[in-house]
Image: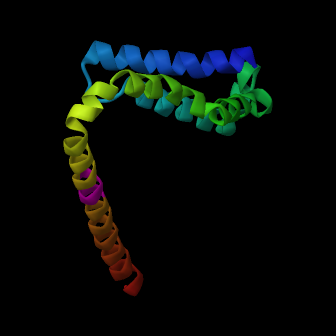
Amino acid sequence: MIASLTVVLLCQLIGEIIVQGLSLPLPGPVLGLLLLLIMLLARDRFVMMARGPFRDNSVENVSKGLLTHLSLLFVPAGVGVVQKLDLLAAHGIGIICILMVSVTVTLLATVLTFQIVSRFTSREDAR
């Protein structure tokens, strides 16, 4: 289990090093997840990679364990919000307005993207 957790964290660290070293406009953990995905796909394709922390789905089990406790990662953000209650009181209406506008724009962009993709896929299905 510790070896599998080390693999997950090393992938995140390698992703962060690559992003910082090349000044890429991408979060390091996202690149690390892509690296982990490539490693897991290679493990499934090549039997010789199914050793050590990659055997018996141990990386998947560690990932599931992390996901079950994901809510704990939101505690620091909640503490930060509570520490800034004075700013929320002073700018609360503006924050609520911005949140409403950003949610509306996000929903509209999602709907438009879905409609465009569904039109393209329906045209290809008609052929």
Quarter the N terminus occupies: top right
The answer to which quarter of the image holds residue 122 is: bottom left
Rendered residue at 21%/36% (across/down):
91
Name the residue nearer the viewer: 67 or 42.
Answer: 67
Q: Which segment did they paint magenta?
A: 102-106
The majority secondary structure of the magenta stretch comes to helix
Figure check: 106 above or below 93: below
Rendered residue at 33%/81% (across/down):
123
Q: Verify whether residue 78 appears in magenta.
A: no
Measured as percent of width and height from the top left, residue 83 is found at: 38, 21
Q: Verify whether residue 103 appears in magenta.
A: yes
Measured as percent of width and height from the top left, residue 121 is found at: 37, 74
Name the residue nearer the viewer: 65 or 55.
Answer: 65
The residue furthest bottom is 126
Name the residue nearer the viewer: 93 or 107.
Answer: 93
Measured as percent of width and height from the top left, residue 109 is found at: 26, 60
Rendered residue at 26%/59% (across/down):
104
